[in-house]
Amino acid sequence: MGETLQTLGIQWPKLIAQTINFAIVLFVLWKWAYQPVLRMLELRRQKIAESMAQAERIRAELEATERQRTQILAEAQAQAQKLIEEARQAAARLQAQEAQKAVAAAEQILAKAREAAELDRARMLAELKREIGRLVVQTTITVTGKVLTPEDQRRILDEATRQVAA
C-alpha cells in the first residue's frame, strides 16, 4: 500500500496537514456559517408556521364575524319587519278610532239637525196655527159681518187650532 500511495503521489505529511486544514475549515464553516443558516431557516420556518396559524385564526374569526354579521342583519331585518307591522296595526287602529269618532260626530250632527228641524217645525206649526186662527176669525168677521167678542174669537180660534192639529 505504501508503494501505491507513492505511485499516486500521495505524501503522508501533506495528506494529514490537508485533512487537518479541511477539518478546521469544516469546523469553522459548521460553527459560523452552517449553524446560523440552519437557525435562520428554523426561525423562518417558525415564522411561516406562526403566520399560517395566524392566518387560520384570522380566517376563522372572519368566518365567525361574517356569521355574526349575517345573524345581526337577519335580526335587524326581522325587527324592522316587526316594527313595520306594528306601525301598520297602530295605523289601522288609529284609522278605525278616527272613523268611529267621525261616525259619532256625524250622528251627533244629525241628531242636532233633527232636533233643530223638529224645533223649527214646532215653531212653524205654532205660527201656522196662530195665522190660521187669525185668518178664520177675520174670515168669520168678514163673512158674517158682525163684530165678534173676544170670547167668540177665542172659541173660534181654539176650534180652528184643534182642527189644524188633527
Image: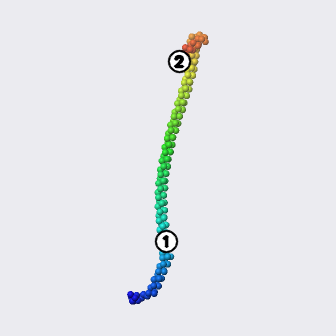
Up the image or down, 135 lies above or below 68; here it is: above
Towards the viewer: 25 or 116: 25
For residue 39, the mark is 1
Alpha carbon distance from label 2 to label 1: 129 Å
Q: Residue at x 57, y 22 (%)?
A: 123
Q: Residue at x 52, y 33 (%)?
A: 103
Give coordinates of residue 20: x percent, y percent.
47, 82
SS assignment at label 2? helix
Closest to the camera, between mark 2 and mark 1, is 1
- Answer yes or no: is residue 142 visible: no
Amino acid type, residue under disc 1 in the picture: Arg
Q: Which callout, 2 or 1, points at the residue further toward the start of the chain? A: 1
- Answer yes or no: is residue 35 visible: yes
Q: Which residue matches tag 2?
A: 165
Amino acid type, residue under disc 2 in the picture: Ala
Up the image or down, 163 lies above or below 52; here it is: above
Towards the viewer: 134 or 22: 22
Q: Residue at x 42, y 88 (%)?
A: 9
Q: Residue at x 44, y 87 (%)?
A: 12
For residue 84, the mark is none
Give coordinates of residue 15: x percent, y percent.
44, 85
Give coordinates of residue 141: x percent, y percent.
58, 12
- Give the total of numbered labels: 2
Towards the viewer: 96 or 114: 96
Q: How is the image coloured?
A: rainbow
- Dot 2: few (<14), some (14–19), or many (≥20) neighbours within 10 Å? few
